[in-house]
Amino acid sequence: MVKRIDDTEAEQLLAGMTPAGRPELRDLAGALGSARAAAQSVTAPQPSALVMARLEGQSLPPVSNSGEVDVTSSSADGRATLVVRRPAFSGGVRSMMEWISGVSLTSKIAIGMGVVVFGVAGVGAAGALPGPAQSAFDTIVSTVTGSEPEVDDDPAGYVDDESDVDDDPARPDEDEVEVDDDPAPQVEDESEDDDDPARHDEDESDVDDDPAPHVEDESDVDDDSAPGVEDDEGEVDDDPAPQVEDESDVDDDPATVTEED
Amino acid sequence: MTAPGDAGAEAFASVLAAAQAGAGWACTRLWNSHAPAVSAFLAARGSREPDDLTSEVFLVVFDRLGDFRGDAAAFRSFVFSIAYRRLVDELRVRGRRGESVELIAEEDPRRASSAEEDALERLANERTVALLRSLPPDQRDVMVLRVVADLTVEQVAVVLGKREGAVKALQRRALVQLRKKISDPRTPAGPADDSGE
């Protein structure tokens, strides 16, 4: 029958010592002792850049929700703080994706239309549409804005013999801006066609929703995972603070003390 | 006249206060005194990138330093509580996602290794650590925190959020199991993976 290991013997074993009168535990004590020695031979790893900044006394201010660092904060000893601007880009993209996945179908269609209108207007203003389309576009522009295409405006003295439609890419920007109202009705037809893709989009957005909760799940899991800098809830509270009261000096493991020295 | 223990406590208190005030030398002292054990603990508990994770742990530690109140023992529990949570996060994420293995130059076995890597390698190859990894998760947590992280029963209880009695019971059971495994060399010592990979 195997004899029970009591708490005192357990402590001795964990320290790598064989308890008195228990020679059968010698191998276990030796194994634990060598594991402890191997662990203690591990040296401090190379700190990351952010940790290195801390070790150099540069206190990094907390990161705000917008991803920007509060530049006005300073360290307690009055030293100037490191001014760091961490990339808020990924957070911005994520917010935008979340926003897009959250908007209604109608809004998505409207957004899509807007993108199409701006795209067509931009390409048309640049004179890059195919011949007939460019002519139609320019007609609309002249109808809406009342601006007559003036060949003379062409700074390069470029003469277009084909028509009186000015496809000069250097056309004033005003025309581009004012055009926006008109093509919209034309594009509406397309937008009706777009309904299907929009439904597709909706489906996709449902699919896209997955990564977001995925991330959120992770953040649930990683309580302090956004390099732990952002959240300061909870964990400290259940950390040592409550237990601090009567931690005696006995608890200080000697290794720590020596290391600190 | 102050006892050595008091002197140590005072020394820690002054280092802590300086670190809380943002003094780099004090943060470096805290890093030097705790990072090796944190890294060893993370490596022994199966972290794939214990050094990176150690840095992440210390970023949190430094951020929360201002809220910490306590002595050296409590601080050690504080550090390992954060380390333990980060490790659990990593294991969970790994378990959920599966894992992609990429070729990393630093991990190329053909590359000459540094002293720290040798030490970590030695730790990972240590038979007892392999035996510890074969224990059930609860027992393994207790044993790795006790042997590799060098924590007391009280500190382990804080880190794991268990009662001291429960920690002692887990420790006792683990020792019995280890003894069986050591006395029976045919017992496989493969890691009982809790990341669900």
Image (tube, coloured by chain):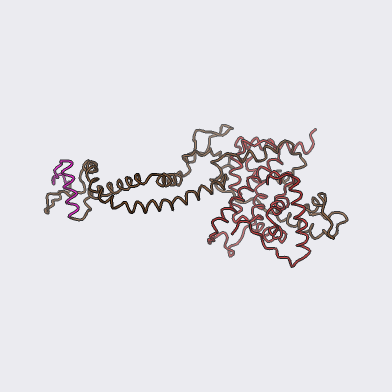
Chain colours: A brown, B red
Question: Residue B194 appears in which quarter of the rendering?
Answer: bottom right
Secondary structure mostly taken by the magenta-highlighted segment of the chain: helix
B67 displayed left or right of B4? left
- Residue A151 lies in magenta, yes or no? yes
In front of the other: B8 or B160: B160
Q: Nearer the viewer, residue A231 or A37?
A: A231
Judge left or right: residue B96 versus residue A252.
left
**Residue B127 image offset from top left, x and y in percent:** 71, 61
Residue at far bottom of view:
B186
In this rendering, position of residue B174 left or right of residue A180: right
Q: Is residue A84 above or below residue A28?
A: above
Q: Residue at x 22, y 48 (%)?
A: A186
- The location of residue A88, given as percent across then percent down, is 45, 43
All told, the count of numbered labels is 0
Residue B12 spot, x, y in % from top left: 70, 38
Quadrant of the image containing the N terminus of chain B? top right
Q: Is residue B85 magenta?
A: no
Quarter of the C terminus of chain B within the rendering: bottom right
What residue is at 68 percent from the left and 58 percent from the top?
B133
Write the residue at 67% across / 63% down. Answer: B190
Q: Give left or right: position of B161 versus A213.
A: right
Q: Closer to the camera, A36 or B8?
A: A36
Residue B40 on image: x %, y %: 66, 53
Magenta-highlighted residues: A132-154
